[in-house]
Amino acid sequence: MSTTPPSIAGPSGSAGDSTTTISITENVTAVTKFTADKDVTWSLIDPLTDNIYSGLSYDTEKGDFTLNIKSQSESSVLDVGGNTDGTKGFLTKLTLEYSEGSYSRIDGSNLQNGYDYRGQTTSIRSYWIPDWNGEDPIVVTQTYVNSEGITYTDNYYFVDGTATNLPTNSALIYGIDIHDKDKFSAFQVHQIMKLLEILTVVMIMLSMSERQTLMETHLTKN
């Protein structure tokens, strides 16, 4: 079995380029075509939905956490491996504990050591987080910068003895302030922007009088 990836050609650039672009006219069905030098299966994905972590586990005997990091084939944004210059790849991994309505940092690691963490595991030892009482919710947040300089932040939580990438209690979501974009995963930002786009379309569709009434109602409530 060949392990050489296919060379894919798009509407611009050369075959094998990591990106390709095209400008299209509205209201057309035929956009462009891609070709490959091997038999391939095509699918459409949104790279912003690709997270960094694939799972988190907790050793109840040792008190250690283990995080599974996706490989590049599992997450297309992970196109930079080990790095040491502080500008690309895996940057910092922070562990925060939720207590009395807010998160506070209890551990942090700089992953700019040249090691390629893609497809590997990384640990949080119990003696690194001696301040954790073993019960309060925890979030581990990983910052990553891909080859294009786009910053991704992925969070994984440990709540009531269960690991999850999105807690059911919205109060536990780390980085709820939209203005602090580095606290959001790329997918969360994408979801928020889509919601804002929908709201914008709705406002445009409202007549001027309806918009005025809506604004007056909002001001009255506030």
Image (cartoon, rainbow, N blue to C red):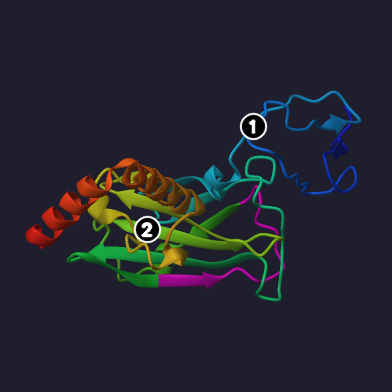
* 222, 130: nearer the viewer: 222
Q: CA distance from mark 2 to mark 1?
A: 31 Å
**N-term-proximal mark, 2 vs 1:** 1
User: Where 75 falls versus 110 (above or below)?
Assistant: above
Residue designated by label 1: 44
Q: Amino acid at mark 2?
A: Val
Looking at the rendering, the stretch of residues picked out in magenta corresponds to: 107-120
Residue designated by label 2: 139
Residue 25 found in image quarter? top right
Q: Position of residue 219 (x, y in %)?
A: 13, 61
Q: Amino acid at mark 1?
A: Leu
Q: Is residue 205 left or right of residue 215?
A: right
Chief secondary structure of the magenta span? Answer: loop
What element does badge 2 sit on?
strand
* 215, 127: nearer the viewer: 215
User: Where 57 falls versus 147 (above or below)?
Assistant: above
* 130, 214: nearer the viewer: 214
- Pointer 2 with pointer 1, Cβ within 8 A: no
- State the residue at coordinates (45%, 62%): 125
Point out the residue furthest to the bottom here.
Answer: 85
Q: Position of residue 217 (x, y in %)?
A: 12, 53
Q: Position of residue 57 (x, y in %)?
A: 43, 46
Q: Position of residue 97 (x, y in %)?
A: 31, 64
User: Where 35 falls versus 69 (above or below)?
Assistant: above
